[in-house]
Image (cartoon, rainbow, N blue to C red):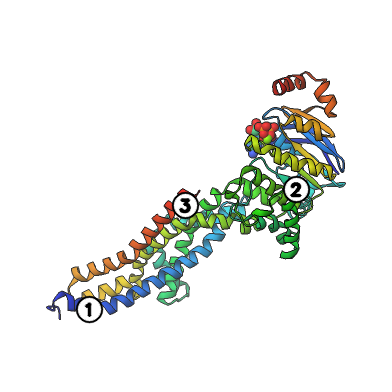
Amino acid sequence: MIRLEKIYKKFERLEVLKGVDLVVEKGEVVVIIGPSGAGKSTLLRCVNLLERPTSGRVIFEGIDITRMDGREIDRVRERIGMVFQHINLFNHLNVLDNVTLAPVKVKGLSRSEAEHIANSLLARMGIEDKLYAYPSQLSGGQRQRVAIARALAMQPDIMLFDEPTSALDPEMIKEVLDVMSSLVKDGMTMIIVTHEMGFAREVADRIIFMDNGYIVEEGSPKEIFSNPKEERTVMFLSKILY
Amino acid sequence: MSDEPFFPFLMSILPHLGKGTLMTVELTIISVGIGVLIGIFGGIARVSKRPLLFIPSTIYVEIIRGTPLLAQLFIVYFGLPSLGINLPPFTSAVIAMGINSGAYVTEIFRGGIQSIERGQMEAARSLGLSYLQAMRYIILPQAFKRILPPLGNEFIAMLKDSSLASTIAIAELMRVGREITSRTFRSFEVLAVVALMYLAITLPLSLIVRYTERRMSVSD
Ligand SMILES: Nc1ncnc2c1ncn2[C@@H]1O[C@H](COP(=O)(O)OP(=O)(O)OP(=O)(O)O)[C@@H](O)[C@H]1O
Ligand SMILES: [Mg+2]
């Protein structure tokens, strides 16, 4: 479904991605782990071209999207949902409008069709009683669940998560991870950057360990967590798992 | 007539000054209205990465803000006729003041747009909204709320500066005051009343601006 080929990304003189190759098949759940500054977010943002790779190709459903013009890329982004560490709900819109805006303005759904989809998604996220609340009136966990509903409302083929629980208070992490687990059960294709190792072990088909702009090692959760081959992986895991 | 006691005299000139005040307000509303229209697009152009938008909008802002409004007014009213373009005083004033206000409002919008966290634009783009859709539905509505106080200040500044239009034969408050002065020779009283009439409009406005500013700093 997604194939990244030789992705390089430079910011000014800082090279953040140094030739990353990654294939994600339909229905697969790939979890990316690695130390701060490894380039995980940058890699994820290259998938939907929020960040333009300096070189390399991003192939989505067989088509190289790095060659597309702006409008075509907008059409591809409709099909790639993204959830951010800083949540980024639209502050001036209530929950329902946050979720229905893109389906109406981008997909051209009628207001009632969009609300129908939003209502069932928000019910699934457990926020059906907050439809008219504004983001500032919600807890962090509720906000992130609305953000997930907002992305899902476009009925994407794949979902990208960039540390969706890192900005949350500990007691709210579980409610967000539970929602993500239920997406995994539904067979959603997902790329997840996270520091939640327990969750990663549970849901991942494949774990990618990144450091310093490279994919250092990848494998099943068992291979990575129980039997890592690279020294850097061992060091990272020993720091994070104690 | 000029020996009349102050209050009867004041009563006799107030209707004229009232008309002048209306003209002043009208001039200001139309000019700032034009300024806001220019400013929305100017602000978007100023934050654009496209040189074709960024460079002209920057030049516009620098030229207008670096030259006196009086010069701009004269160029439109006295200068354009020598190019064969003759505009009536009111039209000239509104054009010059609108273009002038547009430069300041452009910078106000630029600041407002840039004050919205980057994540808002990114979230919008990740859903498939185009850059302009993201501006329209996500960034500008939030920016607009934040720039209400500076826009209020711009309106106050323009209200005062509209007195310059008195130099091109527009019967706004300042001009009316000076005409009364030259008829009655009671300069101090008349001009003091004129000044107070400006103050009567600007003071409440600036109190409102300060109030909304304070409320916003509490809410976010
Ligand atoms: N827009 C940018 N401009 C300049 N440098 C950037 C930009 N975005 C990221 N970087 C730099 O690129 C490097 C990798 O950043 P990235 O956010 O991809 O790391 P990460 O693996 O996601 O780390 P974290 O776990 O802290 O989120 C960092 O050194 C960061 O400072
Ligand atoms: Mg990151």
At label 1, the amino acid type is: Met
Judge the density around disc 2: few (<14), some (14-19), many (≥20) Cα neighbours within 10 Å. Answer: many
Would residue A53 be seen by someone viewing this image from the given angle?
no
Left or right: residue B13 versus residue A118 is left
Left or right: residue A108 versus residue B9 is right
Tag 1's secondary structure?
helix
The x and y percentages for residue B87 are 45, 76
Q: Are marks 3 and 1 on the same chain?
A: yes
Q: CA distance from mark 2 to mark 1?
A: 69 Å
Q: Along the polypeptide, which appears first: circle 3 or circle 1?
A: 1
Disc 3 to disc 1: CB gap under 8 Å: no
The x and y percentages for residue A13 are 65, 32
The x and y percentages for residue A217 are 81, 26
* Residue under label 2: A81
Looking at the rendered image, the disc whose residue lies closer to the viewer, 3 or 1, is 3
Q: Does the closest atom of ligand 2 sit within 8 Å of the Cβ of label 2?
A: no
**Which chain does the numbered disc 2 sit on?**
A
